[in-house]
C-alpha cells in the first residue's frame, strides 16, 4: 500500500538507487574477498584489480624516454660453515633435512607478506595463476609448456618448469598448487634420465637451485633429498683435468663431455654453479660439492684477463680462456660476473673469499674502462662488447640488464658508491629499450648510435626483434627499488608488466614469447613459454611491487642466476 501511495517519480528513484547499490555490491565483493583471503594466506582465485589496464600507454601517450635525467697463490677456502645446530651428515638419506634448519621458519612464506598485497601484486598473482593453469592443463610433469599449441616439450626430462616454479608458488602463497607439485616431486621426479647432452649449467641453476630454494622456503626434507640425488648425478661433470665442469652430462650413465664439435665451453656456464654446489655441501655435510666449486673459482681467478674482463669461451680441459675472444656481459659472459660478487656475499664476506670480491672490483673497473659508452643524441649510458677482445661494438644484449641489479646489490654489501651511480644510469637505459618499441617490450638485442649526428639513440636489427619473456630488466628494477626506495622503479616495472599483459597473454591460459616487438599490430605470438617466466620474471615482478622489505631481505638472502633465493651464511674468519 505504501508503494502504491508514492508518486511514479519516487518509485523510479527508489528503483534506481537499488540498482546502483546492487551494481556496487556486485563489483566490490570479489575484491574484498580476495584481500581477506590473501591476508589469511589462502590461495587466490584472481580477478581483475580495479584500474587495471590491459596494455601500455599508446606510443604518443608514453612519456618521453629522455625526460628523466640520470643521477649525478690462493689459500684454499674453508669448508662452508654448517648451520648452527646441524651435525655433520654423510651419504644420501631420507630425512637429511631433518637435522638441518633453514633460517626461515617453516611455513612463513605460506602467505603473501606481513602487509596486504598491492593492486599491482594482485595483478602479478593473476598472471601467475593464468600461467600455471596452462602448465597444469597442457604440460604437467613435463619440462616446458607451449600454451598457444596447447602442448608440451621435453628438454631435460625432469619436470623443469615445475621445479623451477616451486619457490615462486611458495612466495605468492599458492598453497594448493604447491601441495600438488610437492606430491609430483615426491612420487614422480626421477633424475635417471638417459640423455647424452643434458646441460650441466642449466640443470644446476634451474633444477638444483630450485630444489634448494624450495627446501629453504618450506623446511620440507623431500626437496633437499631430491637436491642431493641430483647433485650426486652431476658430480662426474666436475672431473675434468682443469677442474672446470664439462658442459654436458648423461644423468643415467654419468658420462660427461663437451659438445662433439668443440672443447670450449661458455664462460658463463662453467663459472656459474658455485652458489648451488656450496649450499648443497653446507646442508648435507658432503665436502665434494664445495671442493668442486672451489676448484672452479680458483682456476678462473688465476686465468689471464683484460683488466678483469674475460672472453666468452674457455677450454674446460685446460682451463685456459680463449685468447682473442669476444668480451661481453651478455650471452655466454653475463653470470660469470654476477657470481663473483654473490659468492663473496654468500660466504658472509669471509676473508677466504675476498679474492672473489677483488675479481668483481677489477671487472667493474674494466667494464667502466672498456665497455661503457654514451649514445647520441640523448647520452644514454650503455655496455657494449669487445669483438676479438679489442674492437668495440655498440651492441647490448637484454641479458646485460642484470648488471644494474648486481651493482646495486654489491653496493648494499659494501662496494663503492660509484657502482650505484652507474647502476642508476644503466637502469634508465634498460628501461629505454622497452619504451622505444611499439609494443613497450624490449628486443633480445639493442644497438646504440654513438655518432654525434644521430637522430635516434637505438636501433634494432630484424633478427633481434623477438622477446622471450626475459627477466633481467625486471630483476634489476627489483634491486634498485629495494636499495634506493625510489618508486619510479616500481612505475617502470608496472609499465613493462602491462605490456606483457597486452601482447603475450593467450587464452584460455598462459603467456608466450613474441617475434617482433616493433610491430604492435602483429607481434607474432610464438607457441613457447620459457620456464624462467615462472621462475624469474613473475617472481621479480611480485617482489618489485611488494611494500614488505622483510620478504626475503637482501641482507639475509641472495638470488642465484635463475632467481632462486638462498641464505647468506654467518660470517666466518
Image: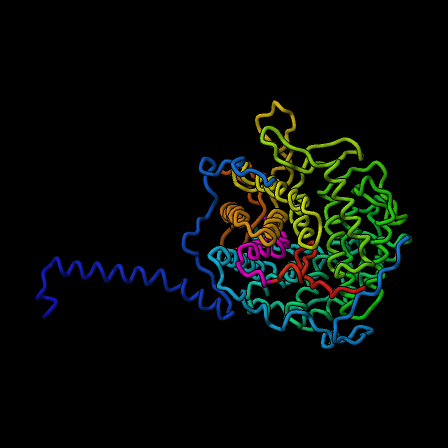
Q: Is residue 571 magenta?
A: no
Q: Residue furthest left?
A: 5
Decide which of 205, 120 is in the foreground and name it: 120
**Is 541 displayed left or right of 45 in the figure?**
right
Decide which of 336, 76 is in the foreground and name it: 76
**Is 324 displayed left or right of 102 in the figure?**
right
Q: Is residue 16 above or below residue 335?
A: below
Task: From the top left corner, tell me how far across and down residue 458 is, in percent.
Answer: 60, 32
Q: Is residue 543 magenta?
A: yes
Task: From the top left corner, tell me how far across and down residue 434 is, in percent.
Answer: 56, 41
Q: Residue at x 74, y 32 (%)?
A: 392
Q: Residue furthest top?
A: 453
Q: In the figure, residue 35 lies in which quadrant?
A: bottom left
Q: In the figure, residue 170 lies in which quadrant?
A: bottom right
Decide which of 59, 116 is in the foreground and name it: 116
Q: Colour scheme in the image? A: rainbow
Can residue 276 be seen in the rendering of this structure? no
Task: From the top left corner, tell me how far across and down residue 305 is, in percent.
Answer: 83, 42
Task: From the top left corner, tell me how far across and down residue 436 is, in percent.
Answer: 54, 36
Q: Quadrant of the C terminus?
A: bottom right
Q: Quadrant of the N terminus?
A: bottom left
Q: Which residues are magenta?
A: 527-551
Can residue 334 be seen in the rendering of this structure? yes
Count of numbered labels shown in the rendering:
0
Q: Residue at x 69, y 70 (%)?
A: 102
**Is 244 displayed left or right of 183 in the figure?**
right
Amino acid at each position: 500500500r505504501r508503494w502504491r501511495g508514492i508518486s511514479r517519480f519516487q518509485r523510479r528513484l527508489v528503483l534506481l538507487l537499488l540498482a546502483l547499490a546492487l551494481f556496487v555490491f556486485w563489483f566490490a565483493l570479489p575484491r574484498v574477498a580476495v584481500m581477506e583471503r590473501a591476508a589469511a594466506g589462502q590461495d587466490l582465485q584472481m580477478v581483475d584489480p580495479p584500474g587495471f589496464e590491459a596494455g601500455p600507454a599508446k606510443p604518443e601517450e608514453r612519456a618521453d624516454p629522455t625526460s628523466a635525467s640520470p643521477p649525478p697463490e690462493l689459500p684454499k677456502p674453508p669448508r662452508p660453515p654448517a648451520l648452527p645446530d646441524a651435525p655433520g651428515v654423510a651419504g644420501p638419506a631420507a630425512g637429511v633435512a631433518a637435522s638441518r634448519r633453514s633460517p626461515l621458519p617453516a611455513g612463513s612464506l605460506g602467505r603473501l607478506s606481513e602487509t596486504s598485497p598491492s593492486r599491482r601484486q594482485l595483478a602479478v598473482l593473476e598472471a601467475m595463476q593464468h600461467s600455471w593453469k596452462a602448465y597444469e592443463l597442457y604440460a604437467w610433469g613435463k619440462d616446458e609448456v607451449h600454451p598457444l599449441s596447447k602442448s608440451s616439450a621435453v628438454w631435460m626430462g625432469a619436470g623443469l618448469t615445475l621445479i623451477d616454479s616451486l619457490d615462486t608458488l611458495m612466495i605468492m602463497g599458492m598453497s594448493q598448487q604447491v601441495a600438488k607439485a610437492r606430491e609430483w616431486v615426491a612420487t614422480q621426479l626421477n633424475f635417471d634420465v638417459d640423455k647424452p647432452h643434458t646441460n650441466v649449467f642449466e640443470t644446476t641453476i634451474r633444477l638444483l637451485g630450485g630444489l634448494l630454494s624450495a627446501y629453504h622456503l618450506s623446511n620440507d626434507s623431500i626437496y633437499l633429498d631430491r637436491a642431493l640425488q641430483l647433485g650426486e648425478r652431476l658430480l662426474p661433470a666436475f672431473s675434468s683435468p682443469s677442474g672446470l665442469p664439462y658442459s654436458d652430462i648423461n644423468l643415467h650413465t654419468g658420462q660427461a663431455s663437451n659438445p662433439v664439435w668443440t672443447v670450449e665451453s661458455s664462460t658463463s656456464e662453467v663459472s656459474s654453479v658455485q652458489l648451488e654446489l656450496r649450499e648443497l655441501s653446507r646442508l648435507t655435510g658432503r665436502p665434494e660439492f664445495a671442493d668442486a666449486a672451489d676448484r672452479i673459482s680458483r682456476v678462473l681467478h688465476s686465468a689471464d684477463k683484460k683488466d678483469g674482463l674475460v672472453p666468452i669461451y674457455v677450454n674446460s680441459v685446460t682451463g685456459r680462456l680463449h685468447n682473442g675472444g669476444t668480451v661481453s656481459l651478455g650471452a655466454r659472459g653475463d653470470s660469470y660476473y654476477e657470481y663473483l660478487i654473490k659468492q663473496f656475499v654468500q660466504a658472509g664476506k669471509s676473508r677466504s673469499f675476498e679474492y672473489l670480491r677483488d675479481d668483481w672490483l677489477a671487472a667493474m673497473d674494466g667494464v667502466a674502462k672498456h665497455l661503457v659508452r654514451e649514445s647520441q643524441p640523448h647520452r644514454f649510458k650503455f655496455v657494449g662488447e669487445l669483438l676479438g677482445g679489442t674492437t668495440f661494438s655498440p651492441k647490448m644484449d637484454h641479458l646485460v640488464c642484470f648488471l644494474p641489479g648486481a651493482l646495486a646489490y654489491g653496493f648494499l654489501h659494501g662496494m663503492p658508491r660509484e657502482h650505484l651511480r652507474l647502476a642508476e644510469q644503466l637502469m634508465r637505459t634498460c628501461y629505454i629499450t622497452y619504451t622505444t618499441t611499439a609494443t613497450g617490450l624490449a628486443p633480445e638485442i639493442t644497438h646504440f648510435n654513438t655518432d654525434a649526428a644521430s637522430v635516434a639513440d637505438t636501433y634494432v636489427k630484424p633478427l633481434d626483434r623477438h622477446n622471450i619473456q626475459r627477466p633481467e630488466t625486471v630483476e634489476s628494477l627489483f634491486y634498485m627499488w629495494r636499495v634506493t626506495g625510489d618508486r619510479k622503479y616500481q612505475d617502470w616495472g608496472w609499465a613493462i608488466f602491462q605490456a606483457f599483459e597486452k601482447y603475450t597473454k593467450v587464452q584460455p591460459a598462459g603467456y608466450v614469447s613474441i617475434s617482433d616487438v616493433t610491430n604492435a599490430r602483429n607481434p607474432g605470438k610464438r607457441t613457447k613459454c620459457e620456464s624462467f617466466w615462472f621462475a624469474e620474471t613473475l617472481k621479480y615482478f611480485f617482489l618489485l611491487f611488494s611494500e614488505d622489505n622483510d620478504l626475503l631481505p637482501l641482507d639475509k638472502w641472495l638470488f642465484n642466476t635463475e632467481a632462486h633465493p638462498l641464505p647468506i651464511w654467518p660470517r666466518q674468519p
